[in-house]
Amino acid sequence: MNTNFLPYTNLDLLEPGCCCPAFDPKAWDQLDLHFRDKLFVHFRTRSLFHIPLNMSAAFFDTWEAIKAAGAEDGQFAILSNDESKWRGEHYFAVTKEVPGLHNVRLTGDFVTRVFEGPYRDAYIWVNEMREDIALMGHRMGRLFFYYTTCPKCAERRGKNYVVGVGEVV
């Protein structure tokens, strides 16, 4: 079992004028992830009926603090969860604690599945993740999505990959 592993992401290949790295869907599809006190920076964003209002600024500020602390590496992921219609929570994978930010550790076993399509299909992906985990003989605990690109980069690339990260309980 490979604990606290995330696929490598080349952080040198960022979109011009953005912090969206290149994404390889094959590297993320159908993985078993085993987190044991895996370190993340946690923060929340405001939403209006699940539409994020301050996500760009919050992501940018958090990413800049992570880089300034030297806490980024090639195991890049941002796990997001819509807590409600009004708020989302997000976890940036980091290599060490970042001063001034909310550092947390996650423990759990997860499976991944890569989806491609518009963000509005997230409700479909939730059901598909639940079904995939049920077919494994388990039930789904926490569910996160790793939105691999911002809407502008998804439009430029012509693909919008989203990784479902479902906890197996």
Image (cartoon, grey):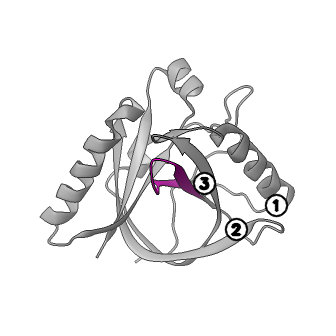
- Specify which label sits upstream in the sequence, 2 or 1: 1
Helix, strand or loop status at disc 3: loop
Q: Which mark is residue 70?
A: 1
How crowded pointer 3 is (Cα within 10 Å; few <14, some 14-19, many 20+) is rated as: some
How crowded pointer 1 is (Cα within 10 Å; few <14, some 14-19, many 20+) is rated as: some
Quadrant of the rendered image containing residue 150: top right
How crowded pointer 2 is (Cα within 10 Å; few <14, some 14-19, many 20+) is rated as: some
The residues bearing labels 2 and 1 have C-alpha atoms spaced at a distance of 8 Å
Q: Mark 3 points at which residue?
A: 76
Q: Mark 2 points at which residue?
A: 95
Is label 2 in contact with label 1 (beta carbons under 8 Å)? yes
- Of residues 2 and 42, the one nearer the viewer is 42
- Specify which label sits upstream in the sequence, 1 or 3: 1
The residues bearing labels 1 and 3 have C-alpha atoms spaced at a distance of 13 Å
Helix, strand or loop status at disc 2: loop
- Specify which label sits upstream in the sequence, 3 or 2: 3
- Of residues 166 and 28, the one nearer the viewer is 166
Q: Where is residue 26 in the image (x, y as percent from the top left)?
A: 39, 44
- Of residues 44 and 103, the one nearer the viewer is 44
Q: Residue at x 57, y 56 (%)?
A: 90
Q: Position of residue 133 (x, y in %)?
A: 22, 63
- Disc 3 residue type (three-letter): Phe
- Disc 1 residue type (three-letter): Gly
Quadrant of the rendered image containing residue 54: top right
Helix, strand or loop status at disc 1: loop
Q: Residue 148 carries which label?
A: none
Residue 78 makes an appearance in the image: no
Q: What stretch is highlighted in magenta?
A: 78-90
